[in-house]
Image: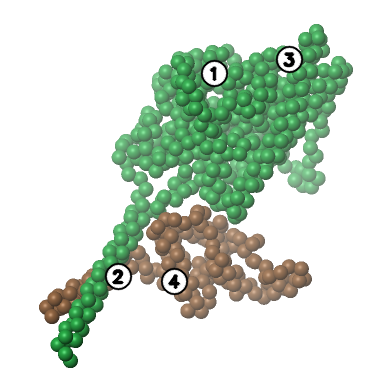
Chain colours: A green, B brown
Amino acid sequence: MSPFRARSEAGAATLRLLAVAIIAALVGAAVVALLVNISERKAEARNPFFRVVELDDDTDDPAIWGKNFPLQYDHYIRTVDQVRTRFGGSEAMPRTPTDADPRSVVSQSRLEEDPRLVTMWNGYAFAVDFREERGHAYMLEDQAFTERQQVVNQPGTCANCHASLHVVYKRLGDGDVFAGFERLNQMPYSEARQYLEHPVSCIDCHDSQTMQLRVTRPAFLEGIRALKASQGIPDYDPNTMATRQEMRAFVCGQCHVEYYFKGPEKRLVYPWAKGIKIEQIQAYYDEAGFHDWLHADTGAPVLKAQHPEFEMWNQGIHARSGVACADCHMPYERVGALKISDHHVRSPLLNVAKACQTCHRWTEEELKARAEQIQERTFLMRGRAMDALVQLIGDLKAAREAGRSDAELALARQLQRQAQFRLDFIEAENSMGFHAPGEALRILGEAIDLAREGQLAVRDPDYQPTFRNQAAAPQPPSQTAAVPAAALTQLAAAPPAP
Amino acid sequence: MRTRSLIATVAAGLIGAVAGIGIFTFGYAKGASYLTNDPKACANCHVMEEQFSGWITASHRGVAVCNDCHTPPGFVAKYAVKALNGWNHSRAFTLGNFHEPIRITGLNRRVTQAACRNCHGEIVAAIDARPAAHTGPLDCIDCHRNVGHLH
């Protein structure tokens, strides 16, 4: 072997060894990286919670809770997002701030989108300003600065659902939540506003020590007690008697409901003592002789429906299957090895994979198309009902101007009240029919019929409306006919047995 | 020569260190559990927690574990499928970029479908002999989706 060749072979062997060393080092680095990753995942799975601050029943600042629960807080603050869906959601619209209203961004005006709403609400503050709802983060300012505040002196009752209130109730009632609730209701809104600091926050739905869900709103506690009493369950208290899954809907039902201000003390009341279906709520209001305002064009004593999401969900297939609000609006999300519920509360249509695909094994496009098909059908019927109502209002207005007496118009006004409340129930509800598609179309169908009957009643003083003598739906003929109606309605609120 | 033996020593040391770290990582990550049939191993990383707790309450818990339905029969085929899924799962869990809720792949669905017929072949033979209006074999889990575990 020549010395030259020997040296070059020795050099090649050195290079080979060097390459082996480098590869071994790289593999070693990769394995250590994997080891660290596994270790991190294990740590995540072991301890999801580090208590860095002490929370108590008076901590209403969500940022403080956020120190212990940074992942949930990070989601929560994202409710500032403004995103449109096909039939809902909000779009950020720039505006020039004024002294009365310093907001530089608002959402789109629903009154501009559909001027028929102005006719429907004529004489009421909603005919002046009504915009698409924005995320939870905006509840304080959107309530404080709506033009409705400038045309009507609103009561403190409004604040019940436009702020974090648990601590405020306690402060106003010297520790007694119900006393604080009563004081707040009797204040003018301008006075109540001084006490409001945060939008709905952790403490409104969670116990500060156990993080368990709990209902803090007195109006819901009273409302659900009245509802359960009507179904034969006395002294119902969701905080001790509801299942966890029920609570995942009840905490949302604290605010996303139909309500009214009862009596001179303006007590916030959820009108469920006869049940939570539209005709049961209507019957409650009729019996109480309540009206929100007298319609400016017709003089009819009409009602304003407000976001009855909880009521409509209760009539739908998802409620019947035991699916709660949080399952779709706050679906579980994996963060590393942790599973948390998404506190960025929003439309499931913006999060189809996590909201729907947990149960429904279709593509995101297909699921979205299905939801939008339901919404489109509701939207079309809503338009027909709106036309019918506006025409009834036009007929009534003309008859009134022609000097027809109140007695002659009483029936038509009553029909306007009925039609209008039904239409508004669907219009104000934030799902465009999705929460209960069949129920939404039934209610709109009735609204159209009632409005047209109202027109007939204007034309013919002897007209006998058919809506009062509708036969009840037939009962099933077999043994199931023995099931009392109360047991059936209960089913819709409670998750089914496994 | 001195340089070479120095490099050889370093390389050998590195290889030894990598082997050591590798063995430790394997043990730390409960690597050996993946070679068993224990269903708990499938929920080691918690992603399969729901499927695992669903299996505990489902009708097949007494007669089949995860591997009975999710791996094919035969040593080589079984460990080939285990290795492929093991690679895919650890890559997904390490990088975190996977679709949720998790979805079964085509291959794994075929494995499961074959497993149904492996036990229930006699019962479904009559169903398979249906009129030729349909094409392709019927898929058991289209209808019996939750027999193994809830979804």
Nearest-to-viewer mark from 3 and 1: 1
Can you give x and y, in whole percent of width and height, for residue A144 in the image?
A: 48, 20
The mark that comes first in sequence, 3 or 1, is 1
Label 3 with label 1: CB-CB less than 8 Å: no
Tag 3 secondary structure: loop
| Residue beneath disc 4 | B83
Mark 3, other Cα within 10 Å: few <14 / some 14–19 / many ≥20: many
Nearest-to-viewer mark from 1 and 2: 1
Q: Are marks 2 and 4 on the same chain?
A: yes
Which residue is located at x 48 percent, y 36 percent?
A81
Chain at tag 2: B
Which amino acid, mark 4?
Answer: Ala
Residue B44, above or below A146: below
Mark 1, other Cα within 10 Å: few <14 / some 14–19 / many ≥20: some
Which amino acid, mark 2?
Answer: Ile
| Residue beneath disc 1 | A147
Along the horizontal axis of the image, is A337 left or right of A473? left
Chain at tag 3: A
Chain at tag 1: A
| Residue beneath disc 3 | A298
Can you give x and y, in whole percent of width and height, for residue A200 in the image?
A: 46, 30
Looking at the rendering, which quadrant does residue B111 occupy? bottom right
Chain at tag 4: B
Which residue is located at x 76 percent, y 71 percent?
B132
The tag on residue B23 is 2
Residue A170, above or below B12: above
Which amino acid, mark 1?
Answer: Glu
Nearest-to-viewer mark from 4 and 1: 1
The mark that comes first in sequence, 2 or 4, is 2
Looking at the rendering, which quadrant does residue B105 occupy? bottom right
Residue A228 showing in the rendered view: no
